[in-house]
Image (cartoon, grey):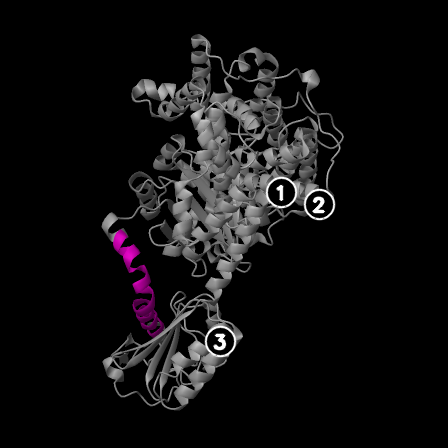
Amino acid sequence: MSACVPAGATESAHTERAHPPHSPPHGRGPRFRVAGADLSAAVAVFLIALPLSLGIALATGAPLQAGLVAAAVGGLVAGRLGGSPLQVSGPAAGLTVVTADLIHQYGWRVTCAVTVLAGLVQLGLSCLRVARGALAVSPAIVHGMLAGIGVTIAVAQAHIVLGGEPQSSVPDNLQALPAQLARLDPAALAVSVLTLAALLLWPRLPGRAGRVLRRVPAALVAVAGATAVAAAAGLVLPVVDLPSWRSHALAGLPEGPVLGLAAAVLTTALVCSVQSLLGAVAVDKLASARPGAGHVVRSDLDRELLGQGAANVVSGALGGLPVAGVAVRSTANVHAGAVSRNSTMIHGLLVVAATLLLVPLLELIPLASLATLVMAVGLRMVSLHHIRTVTRHREVLVYAVTALGVICLGVLEGVVLGIAVAVGVALHRLTRTRITHKEEGGVHHVHVRGQLTFLAVPRLSRALHLVPQGADAVVALDGSFMDHAAYETLQDWQGTHTARGGTVEITGRRTGVRIAEPGDLASGPAPGGEPGTHGDCRCRPWTAWRNHQCDRPSPAPDAEPLPDEASGSVATDPRTGPEPDAPVRGRTPGGIQLVRGLSTFQRRTAPLVRGELARLAREGQRPSQLFLTCADSRVVTSMITSSGPGDLFVVRNVGNLVPPPGAESGDDSVAAAIEYAVDVLAVRSITVCGHSGCGAMQALLDSRPASPAATPLGRWLRHGGPSLERLRDTGAPAPRLAGRAPADDVEQLCLTNVVQQLEHLRAHESVARALKEGRLELHGVYFHVGEAQAYLLAEQEEDRVFDRVRDVDLAV
């Protein structure tokens, strides 16, 4: 579900308000309009797609018209039905090896039938809504697959570049390359060098003229320039041959071994699906990173899979190549400023027009020029950035095995090998646990790095028994998983060691909290107890919140005073500093929590964040958002926004109110924060966040209309008056919550208040100026405390709907 209400539902709601049931509509319906940005983007993509489609068809050994058919179908069918509006689909270089192998084994007509069946498989997967699961494939496998395909393409096209014919496999092509070099065609090599030079130099043209010329795609310039030079020089070279459409071969009935055909169908569907879905995610990132992009809704991956499946069915039936999302064309579409799926569809129409009207020009293109273009695309698929990434994540083995498997055996075999190696690497990491023991200052430290499973229990026991009886021990667990066998071993040793006079502290380096049995956090101390707990509640301030499901008993009124109560000092461990559970002398309960929290921060959290805070101290704050919310203690801004130090500029007040400019409040603090955030910090968005159960909104509802505001709180709440008036205005549309009515008047006022405060924000001069210049966005958020659910305001004409925020649908 998207953060916005589905377009159909919105239009229906508007229609019902505008026209009663069974009444005729007034005037004409909305006319189809194409934005200028979509039209210019479509032309740019078409100029790239035309030579690439011919080149990929040449690389697969298919009829050259098949590439044009796939480009047109990808633009029209996948563009219209797909769930990623800005992704451009067509014949992809990643499918070259698969398609070439199919044509070599079964012929062209059977390959078309396999494409149709692969499309039907994609349609079935779309109905099962498993598109998101395709993203679970390790990136190292995907990058390795693309690298292997790229090497295969480059080696095969090298023969055409030199004026020869490619072989059926990479080993055969490599073996035949010396002989091909001995009989190379100088004319073909000259055209290839010219094409490659244009591809490399055109994007680097300097100066103002270069910026203008670079708007023409390098692929088009390279192919057109090489074609013009070859024609002017009278070079005799193999050129594009587009047979008559009357002899165009369509799909035939599948013929061949059933298992082989089934493997071919599944391979084609797998490669098309994974490449298209990963491309859709990448396009979302590109679109959201554009200047002034505003709010970008993520692609509907299941719908994208449906669109790709339908396109493959149509392309295969019409005698076209398999279709998938194409990175080069999609990137060009986004960078050209496309705003809707119209650009993709218009690009498909332009391909159709070129196929029908530009055949004489297309037949002048030398095959060597197209082969150079495709070879360059193949080499770019071996990305150094991807290699560095997988190396940094210690997955270079998965990448290398997948790439070599694709090169030597085939795409399906290479992917299967990559998956097997990835599983082996994951199991190796799961079982690889380092356990060390050392003594520092009389304290024995046992450090566990990695996952603590039953396989590591013998080594854990040996390390724990190196700790002498009665000694102080710290067990640091640097991992994210501990199974029951390891837990029992650790707790049994802890109980025995503390019973013999020793002390044990068990910590998690990553979480900063002590390890305890789930469900036993409020029931008393762990076996053997912990120093300072004394059998009372095991709550710790500001740690894992599930630890706070109990009440710490207060000291008895007649309790005997502690020896140094008058001093107000904190019992301190000379080795570790203030102990969070140590008695605090002369402190109130709130003071005890404060000191414990501060000491816990200094010992556990500060070492982890010191580097980042030092950087922020040097560079100054550069937040991207102003977050204006209520002072309610239950609203934790860093939690609900998953933000860290330096990310948010936060303003909190009672009722998350934004006084309008010129308000006679005697308090300019909110206006000053807004001006500072927009003009000085240059934040890119301002969010007003309301929440459920807001006491300020309840006070507004309970207030008398004419009651004087005699207290500071009453005077402040006067700024909520416009929200109250808006709520009571029966003619104004009421905000809704995820398609349902608010639970009560308080919730209705909380939602209305967010909408009203956004209007107050627009009235501030600095905000209005930034909005006009397109460098600022406004967002409304409602946080339901009891549900732990965030809702984002989606404003559509007169509808104001707060819809759920889900990670699969929306990037906030």
Left or right, 705 with respect to 105, comes to: left
Q: In which quarter of the view is residue 582 placed? A: bottom left
Q: Is residue 608 magenta?
A: yes
Mark 2 or mark 1, earlier in chain = 2
Element marked by disc 2: helix
Q: Position of residue 421 (x, y in %)?
A: 51, 55
- Rendered residue at 38%/19% (across/down): 213
Q: CA distance from mark 2 to mark 1?
A: 12 Å
Name the spot of residue 243 as percent of width and height, x first: 64, 16
Q: Residue at x 28, y 75 (%)?
A: 576
**Mark 3 crowd level (few <14, some 14–19, many ≥20, 10 Å Cα):** many
Q: Quadrant of residue 90?
A: top right
Q: Nearer the viewer, residue 173 or 552?
A: 173
Q: CA distance from mark 3 to mark 2?
A: 46 Å
| Sequence-first disc among 1 and 3 | 1
Q: Which residue in the protein does label 1 denote?
A: 267
Where does label 3 land, which residue? 486
Residue 259's tag is: 2
Q: Which badge, 3 or 2, comes first in the chain's sequence? A: 2
